[in-house]
Structures are given as structure tokens and as C-alpha cells.
Amino acid sequence: MTDDTPDLRPSLLDPLFAPARGLPGVGPKMAPMIERLLGTPEQPARIVDLLFHLPYGGVSRQMKGSIAEAPPGEPVTLGVTVVEHRPPQPGAGRRPHRVLAEDQSGDITLVFFGMPAPRIAKMLPLGSHRYVSGKIELWDGHRQMVHPARIMDAEGLAALPPVEPIYGATEGLTSRAIGKLAVAALERLPVLPEWQDPAWLARNTWPPFAEALSAEHRPREAPPKATDPLQPPPSTPTRRRLAYDELLASQLALALLRARQRRKAGRVNAGDGRLSADIEAGLPFGLTGAQARAVAEIRADLAADRRMLRLLQGDVGSGKTAVALLAMASAVEAGRQAALMAPTEILARQHYERLAPLAGPLRLRLITGRDRAAERRATLKDLAAGEIDVLVGTHALFQEAVVFRDLGLAVVDEQHRFGVHQRLALGAKGEAVDFLVMTATPIPRTLALTFFGDMDVSVLDEKPAGRQPIKTVTLSVDRIEEVVAGLGRAFERGERAYWICPLVAESEFVDLAAAEARFEDLQKYFGAAVGLIHGKMPGPDKDAAMARFQAGETKLLVSTTVVEVGVDVPEASIMVIEHAERFGLAQLHQLRGRVGRGSAASSCLLLFRGPLGQVSRARLEMMRESEDGFRIAEADLRLRGEGEVLGTRQSGVAAFRLARLESDANLLEAARDDARMIVERDPGLRSARGRALRVLLYLFEREAAIRLLEAG
């Protein structure tokens, strides 16, 4: 088997993809624990999973001074002589067995609960010299060590590693046991070709891959500690080397996908600009500089003979809809059709209602899963005949019955709510379809590169003129009566408000119960002026509740986070978020963005229940300080890590195992540049480095990229 066999992993890597349960010392009792820690229902744990399960810390086991000098609260290893055993008196209940030990500087008591006296006597014979590892505590002014982590003789000390790595463990499988398995796994690591550029390795003083992996599992010194709890700990050169390998595999796979998409012939999708000019002239506002720039970038893509794949990233209220409308007008000018796909029916309907008065000569139609049969048949007939220019809908758009006469541009809203395969399914509805993907979730540049690295990016970083700043206040939940009284005064002035109920659990039913209870409570004050909306409501009821709020029939809308994205009621000027400490930063920012959309001054009240932890406090302070979605998203990445920022349950998105985006962001930029250069110079990965990079792609399970290569 050769390195460039299309669908088969190089045999060189076979030892790493062998089952972890085959390692020496793994019996029938330990095997299920390894599976629970590292396996999945579809994929049993393998050697590579164990090697990539890096320790998150380490305890120094080196000898540290004397008893008198040893700092309390920190792990130390001391050489002591056993002086006296003090077993508990019979019938004394849960009293400990104490062992007095000493060195030249003083004495220390070793404390054992519930351990048989003969076992303690065997470990610590009277008069013997032993080495003990553990944390010293002060008890009544005396030094003691409760249940030492290690008790050794001179031979044991000599065999002890200088630093004991600490692993994420699972019930029944200790960190120490995982460490032994990791060392056994390292012995299975084959000699791999060097896939990194030698000059880049030298500049960063990074060791070879195998050496870096070994150094992480067999550290010579304890890892550096973070000085700021809200910042990740500094990375070691070995950890950075491994992170870069993983990031390069990810970026190379995306670059190959992108090159493949680019190679597919495109069609020119830009017309003479007359429809776009009509629509722009009819807009009730002038385009911001950022909107004009994004429109120009999109038109240049549409006019090129290669496919567009562009991400339009804009903060809440930055005017993405107008940009999308002008892009769709360009496709229609070229004699083709456009589609806009939204993740929910509320959003699809709202896009349609927002576009219709601005669309000028464009023939717009909405299709949802709730259309009556006759209505749906008429829409499908007009679509196939080319009598609809722009079709707006949910994922109903890529059902088999939906046939376009000539789809040229697909606009996808909130891409991360759809899988990539759904995007491709919509693309299959036409010939050489261009893609514009929109998101109102400001994504840190590092995550945009990671999850949308196959796309060009346009950023809307200005708010349209006339948008009011939003005053953000944090209040203890104990002051809820004052909030209710303030709402009453606001309603008398004709204002409207949202009241978002807490995220109680990862259970829609529990969250729903919280919303219903708050709804009933607020009805006592405001009666029929209170509405309720939540994700479990049937679609028509949800639409009706929104319509009543939009019309002003209800003044206060109690909701779960279903209003997070896209809901637009310009008259709503107050946002109350209950138990704000339970929400992520990005979600708080999205919710706040539902107000401040009209001309009235707006406010957002973040109700919290104290005492607040450090991370919750940092989150609420950031919300008070800033309305900049991109700054907030960067802070969210630091606080939560990349696996959470885009939502843990997205399809097709895997958090990294070796890289930490919150601390390795600068490496991601370098990996992206490197990947692009590789694909430009060696698109088939045929050179010596190219063949080594194929091994890297297989090692990090990006073999889909190799299949793309082989498919041409």
C-alpha cells in the first residue's frame, strides 16, 4: 500500500488506529472504562485517541527541601524517618491512624482514614527512611499530610518521573492508570515523515512530532500556571507544535475543499446593474460604507466565472438584509433566480416581510411547510416556469419537489444552524450556484477561519445611521419588583418590552415551565398586555403571538430564547433577561440586539442571582462595557473555549483535541496561510512534503480531503 492510495490510510499509521483495549495491562474490567473515556458509540477508543488525550496539568515529584521549608498547600516530596505509629483507640469511631515522621528540620504527621493498621505498618515500618509525596496542611499549628499520594523507598524514588502528569479521568480509571497506558501507547508510535517546513520549525524552536508528543506525556517540569483565571495558561513549545499540526491538518482540508469548489466552473451571475440601482434608490436609508464594500465584493464574485462562496458576517442590526437583496437582484439581472434559506419559519416569514417592500421590481415568494396544498402547487409551478425571481423559505427549499428554472444564487442565513450537506443540497438545485452565507452571530476571526475557512469573508462592522445605543444595567434579581414598576411606567409612555426567561437546564420542558410561571406572575400586574412565546408552541400560535406583539396588542412578550436571532419589532425598547448569569456572552449580545432597532432610547436589564462566580461576573461586566459584537465574541472565546462558542450540538463541527483556539489563535492564521501556499504550489500533494502532508491528513482524520484530491 502506498501513501497515495485513494481511500486507504497509509499502513504506516495502522498501529495508531489499533484498538486501545489491546494495550498491555488492559483487562476486561478496564476496557469499558477506556471506552467510556475515549470511545464513542460509533468508534471504539484507539491508540491515537489515548495519545491525543493530553494531560491538563502536572505535579512535581522532585525532592523539595526539608519539612520546615516545604510550603503548605503545594505538592512536595520529602525524605523522612518513621518515628512513631499512633493507631486510633478501639471504639473511637472514624478517627485516623497517625504516623509521626521527621527529618533534621522538624516533624510531620502522616494521616490515614479507614486504612488497616497492618497495611500502614508495611508501607511505613518503624525506623525506616521513606519518601512521601503530597500536600502539607497546618492543623492546630502542626504540619500534616493526609493520605500521601506516594510513599516510596530509595529505589521507588529513583524510578519516579520528575513530574507526574494529571489527566482528565473517569470513574474507576485514575489519572495514574491513564498515564501508564499513554506511555505504553507512545511505544506504538511509528517513525513518521516530517510534514512541517524545516525553516518554520527552526524559527519556532519546535521539536519533531513524536518528541513533542512524548514530552507532553512524560513532562520534565510542571506546566506553567495561568496568572489570570480568565486567560488560558501559557503554552509550552511542545504543545504549540502539536496544536499547529492539528490546525494545519484542518486548514489544509478546508483549502483543498475550497480549491475543489473553485475548480468547478462558475457562471457569470451579474447583470447590467439596473435592478440593483432601482432597489438601492428606493431604500429608506443610504448604504453604510461597510454595506457598500460588501456589495462590491459580492458583485465582483458574481461577475467572475468561478463559484462564489462568501460569508457575510454582520453584528446585530448591521444591515445584512439589504446587502443580500442587492446580491439577489444581481443574479436576477443575469436572467437567473435566487433563494434565501432561513433556519426557522418565523425568520423565513420575517425575511420575506422585510424584503417585500424593498424589492422593487423583483418577484418575491415565500414557501414554508405550512402552506396549503393548492398554494404550494401554484408556487412550485411558477418557480419552475421562472415566474418567481426570489424564493424565501426554510429547509423546505431543498425538498425534491422544489424545482427552479435556473437557480443562480443561494443565500443561507445563520449557516451554523444547517449542516454543510444541507448547503450543498440547495446548491444542487441549480447549475454552478453561487453561495452567500449570512450570520448575525459575530464570530471571532479565529473561529471564522476554523469553521468557515473554505469561504471568503465580508464583514459589516458599522451600524446604520439612526441606531440608538442601548443602555445596559445589571441588577440583582432581588430588585425584580422595581423592574416591574419601571415596566409599568414605560408602557404608559407607549413602549414595549421583552422578558427573557432563564436557561434553567438543557431541557426545553424545564425552560418552558420557567417561562409559563413568569408569564402568569406578570399577568397579575399587566393582565392581557402580556404575551408568551416558546419553542414548543405550534407554528401558527407562535406567529400569532409575535403578530400581537408587533401590532402593539401586547406590550410585554415573555419568551424563552426563541427570540434570540432575527426577530424585529422596532417599537420594543426594553429587554429584561432573567438569570443573565446563566447565558453565554454571544447569546446575551444576540438577545440585547432585539431592542435598539427603532428611534427610541433603549435599555437592557440583566437580572442576576448572586453570588457571582468569576467568569459570570466577567461576562456581565463585558456586556455593560461594550456593544461591539466582535469584541464580545473574542471575550466569549476566551471565557468558554471554541467548542461552546458556536453551540456544541452543531452538525459537522468538531472541537480540537490538541489546539486551544483561545490561546493558539495566531497559529491558526499561520496554518491558513501555509495551507493556501501548499495548495497553490502542490495541488495534488505529490511532492515529498505533499506526501508527508497526506499522512498528516490521515492522522487527524481529514481523509475526506484526500478523497477530493483523488476525485480530481
Image: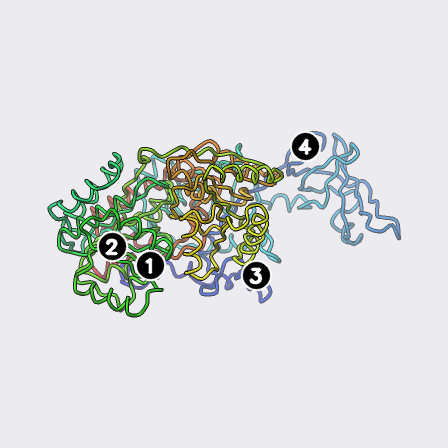
**Counting residues from the N terminus, which is met first, the one under dot 2 or under dot 1?**
1
Badge nearest the viewer, 1 or 3: 1
Q: Amino acid at mark 3?
A: Met
The circle drawn on residue 394 is: 1
Which circle's residue, 4 or 1, is located before the other in the chain?
Answer: 4
Q: CA distance from mark 4 to mark 2?
A: 67 Å
Cβ–Cβ under 8 Å for marks 4 and 1: no
Judged from the image, the secondary structure of the residue bearing numbered disc 2 is strand
Tag 1's secondary structure? Answer: loop
**Of the residues shown, which amino acid type is indicated by label 2?**
Ala
Q: Residue at x 68, y 34 (%)?
A: 72
Which mark is drawn over residue 410?
2
Say the numbered circle drawn on residue 251. none
Tell me which amino acid carries mark 4: Ala
**652 lies above or below 476:** below
- Distance Cα–Cα, label 2 vs label 1: 12 Å
Q: What's the CA distance linking mark 4 and mark 1?
A: 65 Å
Viewer-side label of 2, 1 = 1
2 or 3: tag closer to the N-terminus: 3
- Mark-to-mark CA distance, 1 and 3: 43 Å
